[in-house]
Amino acid sequence: MVKLYTLFLLSLTSAVVFAAPTTPVAESEPLRLIQTGEDKEPFWTTEKQRLDLILKNVGFMDVTDHQELSAFAAPAKKPLPKVVAHQEKFALYVGQISTANMKTALTTFSSFNNRYYKSPSGVESAKWLEKQVSDLIATAGGKSVSNVRRVSHSFSQFSIVARFEGLNATLKNSPIVIGAHQDSINARSPTTGRSPGADDDGSGSIGILEVFRALINVGFRPVRPVEFHWYAGEEAGLLGSQDIAKSYSSSAVDVLAMYQNDMTAYAGTKFAEHFAFVTDYVDAELTALLRLYAKTYGNIAVRDTRCGYGCSDHASWNKYGYRSAFAIEADMSDTNPYIHTANDDLSLINYEHMKQFSKLALGFAVELGNYLG
């Protein structure tokens, strides 16, 4: 997760040019074009300069492969429901969610040296996660999930997409998306440094994996497609999710709503346990609906917070005109202090807190997956 707490005046080396995008001069290390705000001009950076931004909590999006946004028409946003309508369906599935399963899976997922998008262990962790998804589908006989697929990118780690097909053929092109990012980063030594990423974002990735398992176990058949996404390269500027959102936009996929799960396992210390709903770079109507789901299906308080530009993968979908929302583990002033380091390990994981977010993701899947609007 890339985080931005306060406005920050960039103070990079004079080698960085703040100008409209042009083709950079060839160097031994390929430069990447990044943007630190909607009103900021993109500029070319080295990897070290991008890591410096992460260390300074400056949010950014890597727009190297996404400079032609004006060519993509924003999709028309369809109306959302105003009420909770499928509590009986939720009740059928929620008992399947297990903190023991989450603990077992997160222990393995955080045992890789790191899950950096360019590292060998980042590829191996993606393969491990893909196998968990594939094994769940095989165990269920593939009856309710039409496919699981890799999404390749310009880097070695791949994203994973698994889809429950909908029963209503007229809604085939209007899925909902539940996302998390699978990569992790040690901002001081990204390729070789230890980065368990237990909270950021092992918690989100394993939390939605458990929701996926619960739904498969009971033969979930929604009326519209429900997709689970595990994105590669989020820490490098939302690379995987931008590629997928761009692909969906160019193919005119009419995504109804996207909900991001990034850091769900640290309950914070300043306030009573709560869901913290991000209010910037999100769809306000979808966020209001998710607050309703949280109050219905969760057992903790609800607060609002702000995350800043490019802070997680919901921003990619927002960029391409889709409805997206994001709830994080705690107010942004009180999230896990050890992300992007070797100390983002299992010691601060609160599995019951993590389960609250799995229940919210389950409510999202059940309610909007069965919404005919």
Image (cartoon, grey):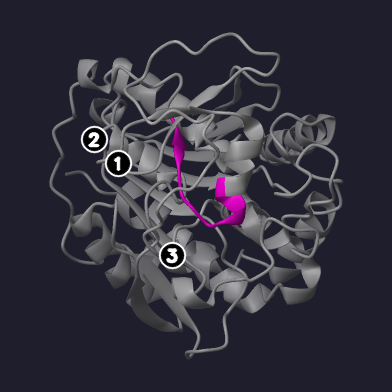
Mark 2: give few (<14), some (14-19) or many (20+) Cα within 10 Å. some
Q: Would residue 54 be counted in the magenta stretch?
A: yes
Residues marked 2 and 3 touching at CB (< 8 Å): no
215 left or right of 190?
left
**On screen, residue 165 above or below 106:** above
Q: Nearer the viewer, mark 2 or mark 3?
A: 3
Q: What's the CA distance linking mark 3 and mark 1?
A: 20 Å
Residues marked 2 and 1 touching at CB (< 8 Å): yes
SS under mark 2: loop
Residue 297, located in which quarter of the rendered image? bottom left
Amino acid type shown at disc 2: Gly
**Viewer-proximal residue among 327 and 214:** 327
Q: Which residue is mark 2?
A: 321
SS under mark 1: helix
Q: Is residue 130 visible?
A: yes
Q: Tell me the number on the disc at residue 318.
A: 1
Nearest to N terminus: mark 2 or mark 3:
3
Q: Tell me the number on the disc at residue 41.
A: none
315 left or right of 181?
left
Amino acid type shown at disc 3: Tyr
Q: Which residue is mark 3?
A: 5
**Viewer-proximal residue among 131 and 348:** 348
**On screen, residue 133 above or below 204:** above
Quarter of the image where the C terminus is located: top left
Mark 1: give few (<14), some (14-19) or many (20+) Cα within 10 Å. some
Residue at image coords 79%, 65%: 343
Residue 234, located in which quarter of the rendered image? top right
* Boundaries of the magenta span: 53-62
Q: Is residue 176 visible?
A: no
